[in-house]
Image: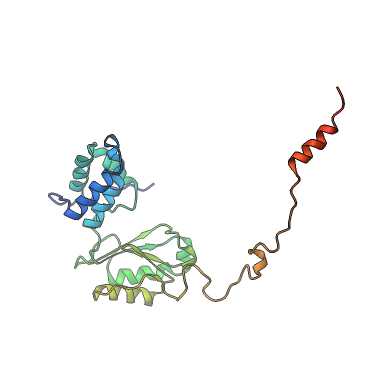
Amino acid sequence: MSVRRLAKEQPASFDFSKDTLKKAQWWIAKYPAERRQSAVIPILWLVQKQEGWVSEPAIRAIAEMLGMPVIRVLEVVTFYTMFQLEPVGKVAFVQLCGTTPCMLCGANDLKKVLHDKIGPKNHVSADGKFSWEEVECLGACSNAPMAAINDYYYEDLTPETLGQIIDDFAAGKKPKPGSYVGRKASEPHDKIQTLTDPKLYDGSAAKKIKLPNAPEKAKKAKKAEPAA
């Protein structure tokens, strides 16, 4: 289990934006008053969407809002890796999958692209616009190699396509998420290689089994019982 700590450099304070505060209150209202602490995860997420990461002053503000000890909020935010404890790129935050399927399909080449265009991993670029990190499996193995950029998945990447995506973000564009080889969802890239016979999955080859009539079976069994 990895050790997750708060960033060494922290802002002096934190304030909820009007939109974040409105949404936070909506979440709190979903729970009984004595269970308002149950809203801690969605409110942490709202704060991260507002700031890009979760700071120590924000943790204290959330604790005060929910009437819970600061340490309890800290326990939650350090447990779930979806919460960023240090600043990330304001334009694009890249989470590159480096687990076995992606690694075998070229993730190491993608690391070099990110290093060349953004800089070392786990550091924000000099202009504050970009950052990247390597993460564990993101669950899109059939479309490897892939990366999560901000809120979306970018799949079937090559060094060229990933480089273009970064350039597009830098130019103020919004690169289209999804597969970069034209496939839909996780369908086969070329032609279907398995389950080519529809009978294997459409149910037409299933044997028709006649289930015994339970009451009738019980009646016959009763007749077969020896007399007392």
Q: How many marks?
A: 0
Q: Residue furthest right?
A: 227
Visible in this render: residue 82? yes
Nearer to the camera, 115 or 144: 144
Q: Is residue 96 placed above or below 227 in the rendered structure? A: below
Depth check, front residue: 197 or 175: 197
Give the answer, above or below, for where 42 lies relative to 193.
Answer: above
Q: Which residue ends up furthest to the left in the rendered image?
A: 12
Whether residue 93 sits left or right of residue 209 in the image: it is left
Percent x, y of residue 134: 36, 60
Q: Position of residue 24 (x, y in %)?
A: 24, 48
> What residue appears at the point 31 percent right and 68 percent down from the top-left corner?
115
Image quadrant in which you'd find residue 203: bottom right
The reply to whether residue 54 is in sight is: no
- Residue 189, how many percent across, how many down? 51, 74
Name the residue rendered at 21%, 51% in the picture: 22
Colouring style: rainbow
Quick one: which residue is furthest to the top in this view? 228
